[in-house]
Image (spheres, rainbow, N blue to C red):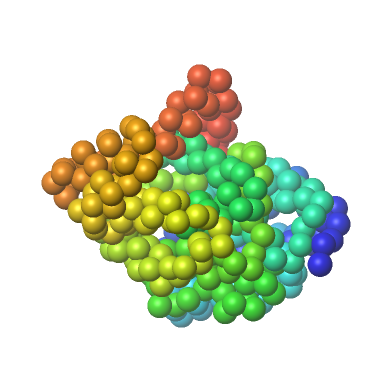
Amino acid sequence: MDCSSAHIKISVLMTVYNDSKYLKYSIESIINQSYKEFEFVIINDGSIDESEKIILSYRDKRIKYYKLNHIGRANALNFGLDVCAYDWVALIDADDISMPNRLYEYSQINDLSDNAIVTNWVKVFNERNKVIYSIKPAGGNEQLKNRLLLHSVVLNCVFYNKKFVKKYEAYCNEYTVAEEYFLWRKVLPFARFIAIPKYLHLMRFRKDSLSNNSFDATRYTVRQIQKLFQGQEIQLINERERNLINGWQEYFYGDRKLAREIFLKLILKLFFQPKIFFAIITTFLPNGHFNKWISLRIRFRIYNFLDSLMLSNRYYNKYLKTNAL
């Protein structure tokens, strides 16, 4: 069902687990949104720091606060979806910052069908409050689905209908990392993905985050999810593209030696593609150096360099100085 979203009511959902250092700035990025038709559901997943004190210091009636014993992020998100009053839900992590127009832009989507999964462009910033990456998921539904076969291009600042994701059991508590990617792959054949080509969210890069501290474990989990849903792509791409994606899946998340074998078989069919030859060369790097190379996120850095040339990062860096600690 399509609906006009001009006056849509939104539940903003945040889960918190020992994020007191950054929490104030994340909360205020939501309560200061230009669009006012929302509630703000905050789930405290058993924090033992100052998180609860910070949350309770706000007297905004839109904030709905729940404190749980520690049950893990996936379970906390599922609990949050159950208590959200409205069908349309926007997620925010407890250390990230939403731009003031984020919810407004969601409200302006004209063809918001119930199976829509909405993402947007994101700036990633470091501990010095400086933008280091520009993430620009782009394209229509089919292009985004093809990209999801390789990477989770739908980030944690997502907007969707809770009834749709709950139809597919929402978040799986078997995963402590990449739980969102599991959900996107599960609903991929049934969802309609939308990317808003605007920077609506600022994502904090933390060296102490779970995904960064368990780089190999995260890569392993993503590859297992990809294997679990192997075959979804049959109706989306042809045989050559499917083999190429399999090669990149192994390169980024699996066995780089296997990736090398796949790429070598494809070279004659793909003619000359510099990035494949360069990928083959990097598969010979020692494990530590290879992981460091992958973690550089060269594509995102190129996007960010181009944005810097256009001077757009000046605005976001200035904004961060007063809104991100």
User: Residue 272 in the image: x percent, y percent?
Assistant: 35, 33
* Furthest residue toward left: 286
Quarter of the image with the N terminus is bottom right
Residue sitting at 29 percent across and 52 percent down? Answer: 262
Residue 282 seen = yes
Determine whether, in the image, residue 119 is placed left or right of residue 161: left
- Where is 168 relative to 160, above or below? below
Taking depth in this image into account, of 239 and 203 the one nearest to the observer is 239
* Furthest residue toward front: 268
Determine whether, in the image, residue 171 is placed left or right of residue 283: right
Determine whether, in the image, residue 8 is placed left or right of residue 68: right
Determine whether, in the image, residue 39 is placed left or right of residue 2: left
User: Residue 73 in the image: x percent, y percent?
Assistant: 46, 70
Using the rendered view, name the quadrant where residue 276 is placed: top left
Using the rendered view, name the quadrant where residue 267 is placed: top left
Total residue callouts = 0
Residue sitting at 33 percent across and 47 percent down? Answer: 266
Residue 33 seen = no
Residue sitting at 84 percent across and 61 percent down? Answer: 3
Taking depth in this image into account, of 37 and 136 the one nearest to the observer is 136
- Where is 90 relative to 125, above or below? below
User: Residue 188 in the image: x percent, y percent?
Assistant: 57, 65
Taking depth in this image into account, of 283 and 94 the one nearest to the observer is 283
- Where is 181 relative to 257, above or below? below
Residue sitting at 64 percent across and 39 percent down? Answer: 198
User: Residue 21 in the image: x percent, y percent?
Assistant: 43, 52
Taking depth in this image into account, of 122 and 153 the one nearest to the observer is 153
